[in-house]
Structure formats: C-alpha cells, structure tokens
Image: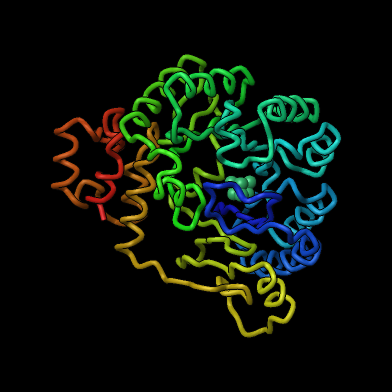
Amino acid sequence: MNLSSLYLHIPFCRIKCTYCAFNTYINLDNLIEPFVNALIKEIQIVGESQVGQQLHTIYIGGGTPSLLTAEQIEKILAAIARYFDVTHDAEISMESNPSDLTSQYMKAVKSVGINRLSIGMQSANEDELTLFARRHDLQAVIRAVDAARHGGFDNLNLDLIYGIPDQTLSDWEKSLQVMLGLQPEHVSLYALGLEDGTPLKTWVENGKVPTPDDDLAADMYDMATDMLAGAGLNQYEISNWSKPGLECRHNLQYWRNLPYPGVGPGAHGYANGVRYSTILSPQRYIKAMNEGGDHYEFPRTPATDQATVVDRESEIAETLIMGLRLTHEGINRSTFKQRFGKDLLDVHPDVIKRYSQHGLLHVDDEVVKITQQGRLLSNMIFRDLV
Ligand code: SF4
C-alpha cells in the first residue's frame, strides 16, 4: 500500500506579519465556518480518489490554524477519517500562534486528534517581534509551551527566524538559548527572506531598516548548528533538527518527493504525477467548492487553479534537489534506481564528481548527501543539478 500525506491550508490570520508573503488574509473571520464546510467538500473529492493509498501524515498549516475552534478541527479530521484510509499511527500536525494557546484549547485540540504542534515563536527578542508585528511577546511563547505540555503534547516544534535586520550574534544566541530552555522535540530555523510585496522588503529598500547581512546570517547558522547539536537535537534537514525518531514525517514526504495532496485556498499538492495549486482567494474558493459540478477528475477539483504534469526529467531533478536537503539521510541510491531505473551517479556525473572532490557532497555505495561544508553552498549545488 502506498503512503501519502495530506496538507490543509487555513488562510486566515489575525494580523499580517511584516515579512510574510504566505496566502493568508486578515479580517475574514466570518468566512471561517463556510470555509470549513467547503474544505470538507474538497477533502471528500480528494479522499475518494485516493483508493489504494494510506494517509500517514496530515499537516494543518497556514495562515493560523489555531484561529479555528477545536470543534472545527474535529469536523475537519472527522471528514478526513471518513474519506481517507488513515494509518492508526498517523502524524497529525497543526501550526499555531502562541497567543491562541490556552491550556483548555490545547487539551481540546489534543483530544480531537492533533498529536504534533508547531508554535511560531520566531524570536525571543521583543524588538524583533515588534519589527515583525507578531501578535505575541516572549511571555506568550513561554505560556503557550506550558499550555501545550499541560494539554498533553509531547511532540512540539518551535520555529525561529535568523538574519533579521539589526540582529546581532548575541541576540541570536539569546533566542536559541531561550528556545532550547523550552525543550522542544523539534526545531525549524528559517533565514529571513525579503519577499516581494511585504512591508519589511519596502523598509529595507527605502533604508528605514538595514539590509540583513548574509555573512552574519551564515555565522548564525553555524552557531545554531553547534548549539542544537549540544542540546541533543539532530540535524536531519538543512533547516530542521529533532530529537531522535521525532523528525517531521510530513515534511520528509516532501523531501523524498513523494505524493501529498493539498487542499484549501492556495494549497500546493503533488499527486498522480501532477503538481497543482488551488484558488488563492478564500471567497472564490468557497464559491467554487459550493458551485462545483461533476466534470473534474482528481487531481483537478473545482478549486484547482493550476496543474502541471511532472515529466520524468523534472521528477528526477526535484528528487535530487529535495533529497539533498536531507542532511543525514541524503538520497538512497538503490531507492533512486528502483524509482527511475538508473544509477544516481549517471545523472549529472560531472556535477556530482566535482562537488564530491571539493568536499561538498558525500558519495558512497549507498547514498549521496550534502556535507556540513556543502550546506552553506546548497543553493549553488541545487542550481547545478537542474
Ligand atoms: S502568523 Fe504566520 S501566516 Fe500569519 S501573517 Fe504571520 S507569518 Fe504569515
């Protein structure tokens, strides 16, 4: 039986953070209930097309899924259980904003089936949280972790951002120390990107805030690598660390380039050899799902916006680029051969040879993976592989 993963996009937030370019909207709380009903219709269509596939991970992302009530989450998970074949030990993750996490809410979402919680901490420095317009302070993060633990969560992820304008190495060290003091099972660290259309990018362009320093960001990454290893967290992906056995199984599905249907406005999915995305606007999404006819065949649903068939060459390139992000696992050569009928070393032999000679790739009989030295130059390596 093939294992699949389901991504659900919840496109609502209370405040738009200044760095954020995700498909998310504020002041649309009145649409949450109709959205949940539309989402359930899409879940039914996708689920009924997935015969022969078992769902082993579910990821509720966004946006801010913690704006949904526990009852709404229960309704969504019940629909997934009705229309999909979900494994008994499925990883069911939910992203959250610290400000939403009371003990009562945590107990409620745990009891309806969420078993992994990701908390958007982002920083332990109030100036940085203010620059980002996050709607929480550090105390709210500490309270949220406490509430999650009281609610019974034993698999917590904390996100942090580095490479922030004006951030010093000691600011970053403080964020790491505070975060490690909260003893998460999983950590994701993101280098700040200046995304088009965001206030932060405009402020950098007009000189209101300084341009982030790439060299300093590289030093921050090195510092984090040492501190997280010292705290017993294993790096398994370029931006992700976990306690042994608690790697995010959902994200591993992406990095192994395996199928993951996506539902909800602006969700991306990969299923039946097709990459697709859904309508961005929640209003149009709800309308499409409510009015959708019968003339579609998954991976098209009434909410599908774009769909592209992935040809063999693209599938190989995507498998290489995503697999090399897995710093520990890398790309297994025999799995690759089974999937594509050729040895990985015969794909881009010159590039692989050159980077292994320079110590940026590790190659042996079983795997090809990126080295510690290669991690900082990963974008260059990935570029050469497509
Ligand atoms: S809470 Fe997350 S999704 Fe919402 S605006 Fe902020 S960064 Fe974006």
Question: Based on the displayed image, in which of its 4 quarters is residue 42 positioned?
Answer: bottom right
- Residue found at x 23% / y 33%: 360
Q: Is residue 322 above or below residue 42?
A: above
Question: Based on the displayed image, in which of its 4 quarters is residue 93 positioned?
Answer: top right
Q: Is residue 23 above or below residue 293?
A: above
- Residue found at x 40% / y 26%: 220
Taking the view exactly as shown, the residue that stands out farthest to the top is 230
> Where does the image place residue 177, in percent across and percent down from the top left?
54, 18
Residue sitting nearer the eye, 72 or 357: 72
> Where does the image place residue 314, in percent across and percent down from the top left?
33, 62
> Where does the image place residue 372, in percent across and percent down from the top left?
31, 28
Q: Is residue 131 left or right of residue 194?
A: right
Q: Is residue 105 above or below residue 141?
A: below
Viewport quadrant of the N terminus: bottom right
Q: Is residue 120 visible?
A: yes
Viewport quadrant of the C terminus: bottom left
